Amino acid sequence: MPKQRYVLLDRDGVINIDSDAFIKSPEEWLPIDGSLEAIALLNAYGYRVVVVTNQSGIARGLFDEAMLEQIHTKMQTLVHEKGGLISAIYYCPHGPDNICACRKPKAGMLLDFAKDYTIDLVDIPVVGDSLRDLQAAKTVGALPILVKTGKGEDTLLKNPQLTTLVFENLYEAAKFIIARP
């Protein structure tokens, strides 16, 4: 039996359109063109897709965990309609001022995933649009991939020294991932 393969995705700015005002309801959650198809493509090539996302809007009182569940139900439904599946969602409900081990750039959510699935994170693709996504991936030896959607372009401008894989969007990153040996 072939070894199970995984791809970890940030949510806001990678799968859906990001907002500086936060995504606070299912109505505000809008997929980026091609992102749902990218998840289905990864699934079709044997990858299980897991979302790993900071959701500080909870700590800020902008929405609660029940609303986050509704947002994620919409995301799952739309992915499913395109023939894809998100196997798990890990989120950090803490704010930037909270002391926690899970908020990216810390690697707590990635480590929880690795423990839950009893896998080694080395070389597992982690796709994000911000420096903190890449930092969390590097901390655990995963393969950091930056997309230019969301905060991606800004991340490149503010970090010209970055040496990481960069793609226009999640679909282009997915095409790269499925072509890897």
Image (cartoon, rainbow, N blue to C red):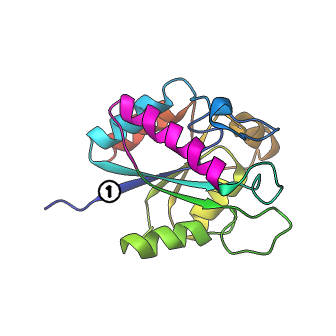
Q: Which residue is mark 1?
A: 5
User: Residue at the left extreme?
Assistant: 1
Report whether 158 appears left or right of 172. Answer: right
User: Residue at the right extreme?
Assistant: 97
Q: Secondary structure at mark 1?
A: strand
Image quarter of residue 167 = top right
Q: Residue at x 51, y 38 (%)?
A: 75
Report whether 177 appears left or right of 71. Answer: left
Image quarter of residue 98 = bottom right
Camera-side residue of 89 and 170: 89
Residue 31 placed where, x, y %? 56, 29
User: Residue at the front extreme?
Assistant: 66
Q: Residues within 10 Å of mark 1 (few under 14, many from 20)?
A: some
Q: Residue at x 71, y 52 (%)?
A: 131
Q: How many marks?
A: 1
Task: Residue type at mark 1: give it.
Answer: Arg
Query: Which SS does the magenta portion mostly show?
Result: helix
Residue 119 seen in the current view: no
- Against 44, residue 96 (above or below) is below
Image quarter of residue 104 = bottom right
Report whether 90 appears left or right of 154. Answer: left
- Against 17, residue 89 (above or below) is below
Residue 77 highlighted magenta (yes or no):
yes
Residue 42 placed where, x, y %? 35, 41
Residue 15 seen in the current view: yes
Residue 27 highlighted magenta (yes or no):
no
Q: Residue at x 56, y 37 (%)?
A: 15
Identify the magenta region.
66-86
Residue 164 placed where, x, y %? 59, 49
